[in-house]
Amino acid sequence: MIRSYQWMLFCLIALVLAFYPYIFGPYYTNVLVNFGIFALYGVSFNLLLGYTGLLSLGHAMYFGTGGYTAALALTHIEGCPLLFALLLGFIASIAVALILCPIVARVGGAAFSMLHLAFGMLMHILALKLRSITGGEDGIGGFPIPSLSIPGIVSIDMTDPVNFFYFAVIVIGGSLWLTWFFTKTPFGQIVISVRDNAKRVDYMGFKVTQSKAVVYTFAAGFAGIAGAVYAMFQDLISADGALGIQNSFQAILITMVGGTGSFFGPLWGSAIFTFIEEMTIRYFEHVELVMGLLLITVIMFFPKGFSGGLQALKNKWWTRRQGTQRRRISNEYP
Amino acid sequence: MDATTAMYVTQGIHGLAYGMVLFLVASGLTLIFGMMGILNIAHAAFFMLSAYFAYQTVDWTGSFWLALLFAPIVTGLFGVFVERFFLRKVHALGHTAELILTVGFMLVIMEAVKIFWGTESLYVSVPPMLKGLVDMGGMDYPIYRFFIIALTVVVLLFLAFILYKTRLGMVVRAAVSDAEMVNALGINVPLLFMFVFGVGSWLAGLAGVTVAPILSVFPGLADQMGMDSFIVVIVGGFGSLGGAFLVAMICGLMSSFGVQFFSSLAPVLMFVFMAVVLAFKPTGFFGERES
């Protein structure tokens, strides 16, 4: 029963997405693409925070690496296909993660967080200083967005927002599915047990440090994809926007507000975040103040985030229909 | 004294002064970490907030000395407020939640400062007594930097006296090494932690006031100091005051000589130093635990 219900939900979402640009118009199409990019970014961050228990304060460096690589590829490589630029962004982020792995996978807790804060700042400074490559504060913009073409069969113009919307939906949806699949594999289960009790996993013969390194690299790669799509979507990538510390905190915010406990938490978080940004930016220029207050409120009063709240509601609703269970639970929590 | 020696001496004193200020900020951070296992991301924001308080006090009263007295105290009280009413409540949720809470406070302080004081640089003038240069065998050096070094040394000696020679200091050190056990011995550790958090914020505040006349007060003030103090705490080893002091001095000298020799890549130098140390010793110089 659950399975058919899931299929129905999936078909419904696919149907809504297919007709979305024609119903809501170009402005809200762009809002949805933005939501999707940050949802993927949040999910990749949650792979670390929610599944491995590692809090990275510099996740933006992978978002930025992916974005800058895609932008550089599209600028400098003559006739670079769109998908190839996307792939390069993915690979570059993974390469950076592999370089940092020997240092960061060995530490945990606060040292991990602080190291990422430092490396994130380092990338930001490098992007600002290496002006000849990255364009300094201005970033890279106005690069050509090539058509998505299969030679001899079809060529789709990607500068059209509606076409780009479908492209983004497929790329982001595919990436989300891959990450979801990843968490369901036996390896994904080991990663969760590393979070809960690393010592015991070590005794059982699994390699803790290497497991952390693999999931770390994986998360970095998908943040890179989010960054690459972001660069193509905006036709611009800038140091402050993509690599700045605010962007790292944005990942934390999205994940915490949505809820770290579930895979789909960051999707809710991204939706709430996009909604609040849309609402506040028209009346109030200090969006970060609102975000900070929101973060404090969530931590203080709703530590499980939005999806945690949904789960609680669902439990309540479910038990109301089954009287015996409700009585048992109400005995436990008077 | 020839020009090369003069350059070395000048940059050396520069680095020493910066290292001292850095240690003022980092000592609070490392003590708080030792007791509670969290790094206060908002610590550098407290530092900046205090610089703004100092500007406001000077603006109202015209006296730098009043600012030096009151701004750090107000910052310390703000730290106590944050600890008592926010941090303590999320303690049960674990270190990650506490860390994220301090991130929230950092965001709020950074933006609130822009709302109250605007984004442009504000200037605090050096008090008349400390204006001017001191003659050191043929080269001139501003008195104010010597004042910073002297003030920091006095404050740190006083702190070291409390920490190593009094009963209170003994309890604090014991709580840093094992908070649970100290709690079990009947000492009110939450109260003690609130006190240490307040003193740590006060130290950051003091640093904020002392650098206000040389760096001017602007919203980006926290960035550089925040990064450097985090690096000091990580490389020195979490919870180790001696390590923090050593690394603060190294960082201070490295940044002043780095600007002299590499100019544009000076900020990168510090990160390379940290990466090299951590690659060989993940706990830092004097650190015993990992997180």
Image (cartoon, helix red, strand yellow):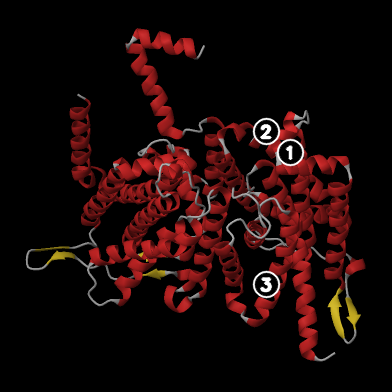
Residue type marked 2: Phe
Residue A330 numbered mark, or none: none
In the image, is residue A88 above or below residue B113?
A: below
Residue found at x 81% / y 91%:
B2
Q: Is residue B223 left or right of residue A81?
A: right
Of tags 1 and 2, which is closer to the observer? 1
B98 left or right, relative to B214: left
- Between A96 and A163, the one lying in front of the other is A96
- Mark 2 crowd level (few <14, some 14–19, many ≥20, 10 Å Cα): few
Same subunit, labels 2 and 3: the answer reads yes
Same chain for marks 1 and 2? Answer: yes
Amino acid at pointer 3: Ser
Q: Amino acid at mark 1?
A: Phe
Q: Using the image as rendered, state which of residue B70 and residue A118 is in the foreground.
A: A118
Q: For the residue labelled by badge 1, is the local secondary structure a helix, a strand or a loop?
A: helix
Question: Which residue in the protein does label 3 denote?
Answer: B255
* Nearer-N-terminus badge (1/2): 2
How far is mark 1 from mark 2, CA to CA? Answer: 13 Å
User: Where residue A151 appears, x then y in whole percent?
Assistant: 10, 68
Label whose residue precedes the other's in the sequence (2 or 3): 2
> Disc 2 and disc 3: Cα gap in Å?
38 Å
Query: Looking at the image, which residue sits at the far right?
Result: B129
Q: Name the mark on residue B193.
A: 1
Tell me residue B216's x, y (percent): 73, 64
- On screen, B153 above or below A136? above
